[in-house]
Image (cartoon, grey):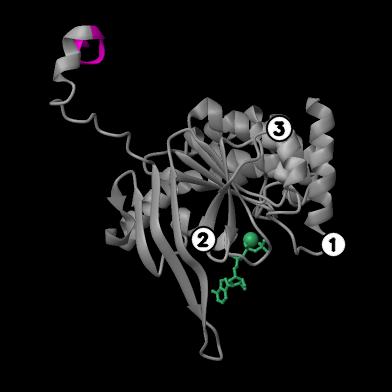
Amino acid sequence: MTDAATTGTVAEPLAELAPEPPAQLALVDLRGVTRDVVLPDGRKLEILRGVDLTVGPGEHVAVVGRSGTGKSTLLNILGLIDSPTSGEYLLEGTPIGRLRSRARARRRGDDFGFVFQQFNLLQGRTALENVAAPLLYARGRKFWTRTRLAAQMLDRVGLGDRLETMPEKLSGGEQQRVAIARALVRGPRVILADEPTGALDVDTGRAIMDLLDEAATDTGAALVTITHDLAIASRADRQFRLADGVLVPIHLDSPAAVVESAEVPLGGMSPAGAGSAVGQRGAHELEATA
Ligand SMILES: Nc1ncnc2c1ncn2[C@@H]1O[C@H](COP(=O)(O)OP(=O)(O)OP(=O)(O)O)[C@@H](O)[C@H]1O
Ligand SMILES: [Mg+2]
């Protein structure tokens, strides 16, 4: 394609007449998404009240918020596990609400990889079997191909020598590596991580985030991380706080901002819980980057 339209003087008089170049299609685009549930006593609980969020290919986004504000609900909607009560969800321009359940399940498997706080591995199955499991649902993959791919992924996360180990024999950090390998094995376009470091110590958590960031960057996948840890949130390209059912952009791009805002987005959490840990981790991160 010649590029006269984008270069120099020839194009300039035409610029006003030329149509706008199409904006890059967002991979994930939530518009006014709400999620209500009806409680047993008949009351309606409005978990999400109008969430707008766009995530582009390869972008890293973090969401923080108090316990019970709807972060997992939001992630489940993003990953097609749950559906909005109202509003629109466009997945690369496709309105998800119009997909039939089989098409939806296919997109969930093809496009998303999930990482959870408690790893959610199949007990009684080896690391290799855990990582190969999502490939059972990918058409046209023979047993040996699945096994080879799974072994490659485990090697990629540093567990190439633990293929036959059962999850219960692995440390928390190692189990999370298996879970990351499992999330990546089908080459997702979006990785959804729900407090991926929540069950790990600070150093292991940081190594796990390094791995997730790196894997997402290498494969060009978008990464949405839910976390209580502002130091971890600050690594993302963009950060949001979920509060009162809406997403509010916050800025944690400097370590100082992490420390300053440690009480802002997460205030009200249990004093012995994530609130204090966040402060420590913020300071820790500050030292590490100073
Ligand atoms: N299916 C449901 N029925 C009733 N209430 C629900 C349902 N799903 C979620 N909730 C409630 O909605 C709120 C948000 O839940 P969610 O799990 O999304 O919060 P969260 O921000 O992920 O919390 P945490 O940080 O503790 O994981 C909670 O009060 C929860 O009890
Ligand atoms: Mg949650």
- x%, y% of residue 198? 74, 51
Ligand 2 quadrant? bottom right
**Which amino acid type is marked by label 2?**
Val
Q: Is residue 29 left or right of residue 168?
A: left
**Residue 79 visible (yes or no):** no
* Residue 49 at least partly seen: yes
- Label 2 Cα crowd, 10 Å radius (few <14 / some 14-19 / many 20+): many
Residue drawn 33% across the image and 56% down it: 96
Task: Examine the rendered structure and indicate whether residue 247 appears above or below residue 225.
Answer: below
List the residue tagged with mark 1.
Answer: 271
Q: Which residue is under mark 2?
A: 246
Counting other residues with Cα less than 10 Å from the Cα at mark 1, is it few (<14), some (14-19), or many (20 or more)? few
- Separation of marks 1 and 2 at Cα, in angstroms: 24 Å
Secondary structure under the numbered disc 3 in the rendered image: loop
Above or below — where is 63 with respect to 18? below
Return the mark for residue 244.
Answer: none
- Residue hosting label 3: 159
Q: CA distance from mark 3 to mark 2?
A: 39 Å
Within 8 Å: ligand 2 and the Cβ of disc 3? no
Q: Which residue occupies 51% across, 60% down?
A: 246
Query: Quick one: SS at disc 1?
Result: loop
Q: Identify the magenta region.
A: 1-8
- Mark 3 and mark 2 in contact? Answer it, CB < 8 Å: no
In the rendered view, does 74 fall on the left or right side of 285?
Answer: left
Task: Identify the image quadrant of the C terminus.
Answer: top right
Relative height, residue 232 to residue 67 (above, below): above
Q: In front: mark 3 or mark 2?
A: 2
Q: Where is residue 195? Give x, y as percent.
A: 67, 51
Amino acid type shown at disc 3: Leu
Amino acid type, label 1: Pro
What SS does tag 2 mark?
strand
Residue beneath the point at 54% across and 25% down: 218
